[in-house]
Image (cartoon, rainbow, N blue to C red):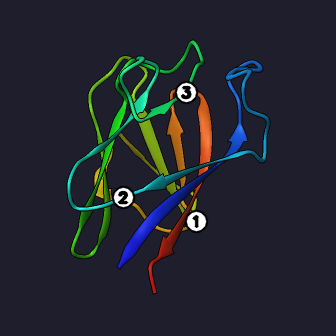
Amino acid sequence: MIAGIKLVLIEKDRGLPDDMSVGDSVNIVVDESRQIFIGRAPDVDVLVKAPSVGRHVVALWLETDGVMVRDLGSGAGSVLEVNGVRTQRPQRLLPDGAVLWIGRVGFRVKLSSDD
């Protein structure tokens, strides 16, 4: 069972977010109790401070088969890149090693399990 996600910053939007450097990571604990929201609004779980990032961009939640990602329909939206294939505004399982683009900010996805 997936216990967490590590998002490793691989590309920034013109130097922003300025509170992160390429290679920095965000660790997210995912459990069955709630969704995790990513965006630029102050009420999200993972804040990405960059002009290309919408207020509420994606939601993550735990499913039996893994972690789901769903685009929330914000302006620039999100893209999930798996083995070079890009899906605009995804709603699907989040695979290990994929690249999740939030606006023009790219994160490499690393899944971890609790075993």
Q: Residue at x 74, y 45 (%)?
A: 24
Q: Is residue 89 visible?
A: no
Question: Is tag 3's residue or tag 1's residue first in the polypeptide sequence?
Answer: 3
Residue 48 badge: 3
Q: Residue at x 70, y 20 (%)?
A: 16
Mark 2–mark 1 CB contact (< 8 Å): no
Residue 34 % position (x, y): 22, 49
Q: Residue at x 74, y 21 (%)?
A: 18
The residue positioned farthest toward the bottom in the image shown: 115
Residue 13 vertical placement versus 78 (above, below): above
Q: Spatial distance from mark 2 to mark 1, Cα to Cα?
A: 17 Å
Q: Quadrant of residue 74?
A: top left
Q: Spatial distance from mark 3 to mark 2, Cα to Cα?
A: 18 Å
Q: Secondary structure at mark 3?
A: loop
Please indicate whether residue 105 sits to the left or right of residue 28 in the image: right
Q: Which residue is mark 1?
A: 97
Residue 106 % position (x, y): 61, 40
Q: Quadrant of residue 43?
A: top left
Q: Is residue 19 visible?
A: yes
Q: Amino acid at mark 1?
A: Gly
Please indicate whether residue 16 sits to the left or right of residue 31 in the image: right
Q: Secondary structure at mark 1?
A: loop
- Tag 2: Cα neighbours inside 10 Å, few (<14), some, or many (≥20)? some
The residue positioned farthest toward the top in the image shown: 51
Residue 30 badge: 2
- Tag 1: Cα neighbours inside 10 Å, few (<14), some, or many (≥20)? some
**Discs 3/2, front:** 2
Question: Is tag 3's residue or tag 2's residue first in the polypeptide sequence?
Answer: 2
